[in-house]
Amino acid sequence: MKHPTPAIVSQAAVRRLPRWALLLLCLSYVCAGFFGRDAWRSADITALGFMGALAQGASSWWSPSLWGWSPEHPAVLPYWLGAWALQLAPAAWAADFVVRIPFGLLLGLALLATWYGTYYLARSPAAQPVAFAFGGEAQPTDYARAMADGGVLAFIACLGLAQLSHETTPALAQLGFAALLFYGIAALPYRSKAPHVAIFAGLLGMGLSGAPTMAMLYLLGGALVHWLDREPGETIQTTRSARIKALLALPAYAAVVCTAAYHLDLWRWKVEAPALSWGTVDGFAQLLIWFTWPAWPLALWTLWRWRWQLWSRGVHRHLAWPLWFVLVTVLATPLGSDSDRTLLLALPALATLAAFALPTLKRQVAALIDWFTLLFFSGCGFTIWVVWIAMQTGVPSQPAANVARLAPGFQASFSLLAFSVAIVATLAWAWLVKWRVGRHRAAIWKSLVLPAGGAALCWLLLMTLWMPLLNYAQSYRNLVQQATPWVGPEGCAETGSLRAVHLSAFQWYSGIRLVAADGESTCEWQLSEPTENMGIRPSVDAGRWAPHTLLRHPVDRAEAVWLLRRR
């Protein structure tokens, strides 16, 4: 018997995932990494510098700059959000924490938009499960809710989401607004106003965050899918009459976004053709495999099990829209300098495709996913704990020696709060494993509980137990504070040839007053970038400035700044 849909789901299988559990998981994932962390190198700390320049009135709001440097990737909205947060927050709050507040909300927006986008796609008639002869099949609303829960779990489980989604960079802003656009197209047949607001806000947000080209490509596919998708029983005439009004608004939204991006000089795409070599192909394949794990195997399974709908003469929104989103992003990924940040935009749609694999998974496949996830994340969590114990006590000796070798000079510290949070997270993981091995075979989202919980556990452990070590290795604080004893907390230094990333680090973490090297300064000190072999740059006036100290990063010795003294 050939079913119109491969989904055979009973009402018992769409049992409700407790809202408190889902909200707690999302909140824990969002908050981990936003507290107690320095701005890491190099995109994170650089963005903080541009935000600070805007907040202090040292830069034009329409063209952010930092001591003459422009952002590597043209964008304005992410820097506006950080600058507004700095202006509104109390002065006593740490700047690197303040600017994370709007970006934490953007990550929450991405999670919420992914849930609702998956929900409305699962409401499509073609996505509904097979109706049973004597009843008992899943009800449309309950089925869509269960699929949406699975979509969010798959989104959180993606390994590539963790670090990039906790930075204050344009990439996170693009992710939040891309997810909003994804929801808007998905919900167009079911809501009248909210989808239009979401589409316009998503397009405008992506355009002002430096991705207008991607926004237009997404919109083009979304408009085609919305036009061609036809529900069973509808005629071409009724479909067109019902949807033509919505489609007329989309070009207007696109025109506004394109105009704004053009006037702000954001309509640029730095296309870099990848070298056709085995190393390039292998690197791209590795990025796709680990960055989108575990969503990509499930997404491929979805395409296989739903292939009859995918290759049918009609267009089905629940498959065509996320597939277009993923294909555009994957094809654009190797064409830019920051492949991982581009690929980040595919995760909401990829998680949605992964969710549609859940109703078709066989019991053996689900068990394989559970066992692999259990072993992988339990092993990761165990390793994090062992290394932390070694940092605190020196036992086991080998992990302690590895830390001393990789992070020379690092002194471990104990935080009762971080330790308590890590203990609670570990106990929650143990309870989750116990729950999963129990008799909970009915719920279709069960196979993604352990992947999402494991990803959240390991990220939470890293952001608590390993936070001092990661700050030591990834922050510029230890580098720039080496200059403070020489210059003095109230002293000044000329900026010389400093790059934007080092300018931002000295501005926020050294306490030194920076002065432009305009020839009129009377500062006793100057900061300058070294040459490739750590020498003095030829642009430095040797008659006025003498080398004093080479400030080096304790972990990455290639990161260095010369402290020069006036002769």
Image: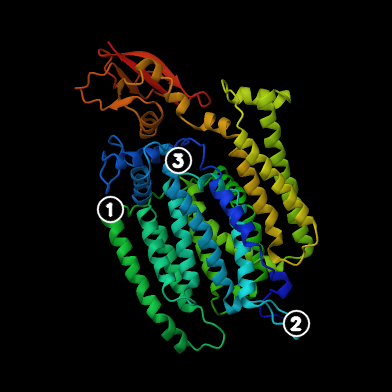
- Where residue 364 appears, as percent x and y from the top left, is 79, 61
In this rendering, the answer to whether 358 lies above or below 110 is below
**Nearest to viewer (mark 3 / mark 2):** 3
- Where residue 229 appears, as percent x and y from the top left, is 51, 78
In this rendering, the answer to whether 117 lies above or below 376 is below
98 sits left or right of 463 in the view: left
Which label sits on residue 97?
3
Quarter-wise, where is residue 120 in the image? bottom right
Q: What residue is rendered at 43% in x and 23% in y?
A: 481
Quarter-wise, where is residue 224 in the image? bottom left
| Mark 1 residue crowding within 10 angstroms, few (<14) / some (14–19) / many (20+) | some
Distance (Cα) linking label 3 and label 1: 28 Å
Q: What residue is rendered at 35% in x and 17% in y?
A: 487
Q: Which residue is mark 2?
A: 1
Distance (Cα) linking label 2 and label 1: 58 Å
Whether residue 88 can be seen here: yes
Quarter-wise, where is residue 22 in the image? bottom right
Q: Nearer the viewer, residue 218 or 276?
A: 218
| Mark 3 residue crowding within 10 angstroms, few (<14) / some (14–19) / many (20+) | some
Determine the secondary structure under disc 1. loop
- Where residue 335 appears, as percent x and y from the top left, is 45, 50
Q: Which residue is mark 1?
A: 264
**Looking at the image, do the residues carrying marks 3 and 1 touch, with CB atoms under 8 Å apart?**
no
